[in-house]
Amino acid sequence: MDWLSYLNPLMQGAWVTIRLALYSTLLGAVFSFLFGIGRLSRSLPCRWASIALIEIFRGTSLLVQLFWLFFALPVLGQALGMDLRLPPVVAGTLALSLNIGAYGAEVVRGAIQAVPRSQHEAAKALDFTPRQTLWRIAIPQAVPEMMPSFCNLAVQNLKDTALVSLIGLGDLAFQAERVRNFTQDSVGVYTLLLLMYFGMALVLAGLMRLLETHVGRWRAKGA
Amino acid sequence: MNDTSNPPDPASSIIVMDQVVKRFGDATVLDHLDFQVAKGEKVTIIGPSGSGKSTVLRILMTLETIDEGLIHVAGKPLWHEYRDGRPVPAGEAHLRAMRKEMGMVFQQFNLFPHMTVRRNVTESPVHVLGLSRAEADRRAHEYLDLVGMTDHADKFPGQLSGGQQQRVAIARALAMRPNIMLFDEPTSALDPELVGEVLTVIRRLSEEHDLTMLLVTHEMEFARQISDRVCFFDKGVVVEQAPPEVMFAEPREDRTREFLKTFIETRQGG
Amino acid sequence: MLFGIEWNTANDWVFAWSILPILLRGLVVTIEATLLGFVVGAALGLVLAALKSVRVRLISWPARVFTEFLRDTPLLVQLFFLYYVLPEYGLVLPAFLTGALALGVQYSAYMSEVYRAGLESITRGQTEAARALDISPLRTFAVIILPQAIPRIIPALGNYLVSIMKDVPVLSVVSILEMLNVARIIGDRSFNYMVPLTLVGALYLILTLVASAGVRILDERLPKRGIPLH
């Protein structure tokens, strides 16, 4: 079990995983707000589109979505006369963020709807437009509510990044497979791999908790 | 029906409610209500719960619609507008313009918890009235000074007592410089020892400014002190209205008498 | 050709229709893996929950760490671990069982939390009342706590059933012929990935909607105050 020699390729893979997790989580957050707020929109087409997207990406397996974007989309592109071949990193990031975006959308929607009606009335009395009320009054109060669920989703997303190894992206899982194939040391490699993911998840959870505290500063200052 | 004795002159009335009906499901909360308020008048509305007193304020603040009747504020229709000379239900743009006439103070204060006191007061002037931050800050200072809360400008609502929060809420409403101030049971949610500081602010407001003020309250003594007119609401109509000296000393209607009796008894007992 | 069934690539719609029976074979495998994984997970989860609630720190603390460990590591890696490591210690299982085991292990962590939360939500007052009436701890658990906990636990477990189903495609890496794997093979051989993969997506959507509806109906049917005992 020459663990030290494994470390180099594994660290490279870990770096890919971290960046992938970072980008997909950020993009996923954007999608969460997009779909979640879209779900609450007064325009019916907007609402239906959001519901459809949420149901599709929550209701189908992430791996199916990943394979579809990587294998099926190019075929569709051919039929439409467009080059829709996505490199693994794009397909991976997109699939991960759409997936986490769909789950996060429900969190966003729930938190926004949980803001008391009295806040909306106070805003109306001060003559804010509905859009101003949403962005300046409702969302800032909803965000601290979303954080615990977002924390869980972020860790889930980190775990899900391992799947992109199946479309050839050189992340931690991919590198681990290569090392294992080369050394045949399953026990050593996989134990190390599990520990590395565990460590990354703990760090991520810690960071999310810091973010949670920062975002909820005004709540902490109770009289 | 409505007591229309001692009505203000409609020509100088800043609020005119004409045969207003409001229903919530099967319940008729406002029953062909006729009600006027003169410019600069300080009117207190009293009555049992369910009598429609809060609803009147909420309708004026455009938080509730009306089912029948007409309302005019400062000469302009509130829930209707005129297109080609015919009344149609008011659109959002019209309502937004009308809202600027009125400011409201809520029973539960409803301050924005994620903003400091100063930000609570300046947010609307900046984003609705288009003031610069500097101007808004100056205005905020002026009104926070009026309510005695300048020292707390950088605190969050969670750090303040109920009385302090309500005073900030008053400053926040005033900062929009409305012509009419609506107070919906401003002290009902406060611990007894905090009621005084809020009433002092409201009294100061009534004495130093010629705002039109509509106050819904159970604080009878306070109502006697600051009101030009007291209206007793019951079952969605104005049962009786009179200047406070008349109203509290010699109410004409039996219903009014019954209602006031409970307060006198409670006060003597308390 | 797969599973002895030919397909027709005349056009996309004909193709789709002709591969449907093949995909349905994969669907059966998907459902089998889901159910088996669920059963394993529910059982292991119960064990974990029991270990975590033991008063002895030496037992409960490692159980808690292990649960966290399972929750924070990817299913894919856990699967590889079991698939390649177990044989080295003499335990050679068919791929399907390894896959179901991996699913069960991963989800046992979540399910142990469901058990814990469900039991804890029964007010402490119930236990105290039982003690005051001198009912034995075992009987308290079986007759008072459990019937009240079940209506809360089952719907939550049911939701994880749906989650397990969505994780089954990961098992394709150990050559289990569930739906996604079947679709991929069809795609490999016919050079048309879009039709099989889109079909699989649609089938998954239907499965999820049906399963979620089933869980919701079960939730509504369960008496909220506990299984009635006469």
Image: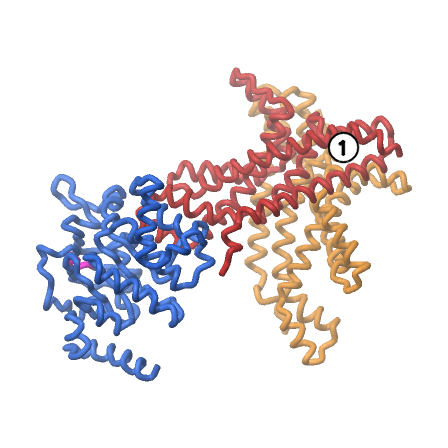
Chain colours: A red, B blue, C orange
Residue B197's x, y, as percent?
34, 66
Mark 1 element type: loop
Is residue B18 covered in magenta? yes
Q: Magenta residues?
A: B16-20
Residue A92's x, y, as percent?
63, 29
Q: Locate residue A209 relative to residue C185 in the image: left or right.
A: left
Amino acid, disc 1: Ser
The C terminus of chain C sits in image quarter: bottom right
Q: Residue at x 23, y 80 (%)?
A: B258
The N terminus of chain C sits in image quarter: top right
Residue A2's x, y, as percent?
88, 32
Give the image quarter of residue C156: bottom right
What residue did someone put label 1 on? C175
Give the image quarter of residue B260: bottom left
Q: Residue at x 73, y 32 (%)?
A: A172
Quick one: C16 or A23, which is closer to the camera? A23
Q: Locate residue B225 relative to residue C174 in the image: left or right.
A: left
Q: Numbered disc 1: what chain?
A: C
Is residue C225 covered in magenta? no
Residue B165's x, y, as percent?
39, 59
Give the image quarter of residue C98: top right
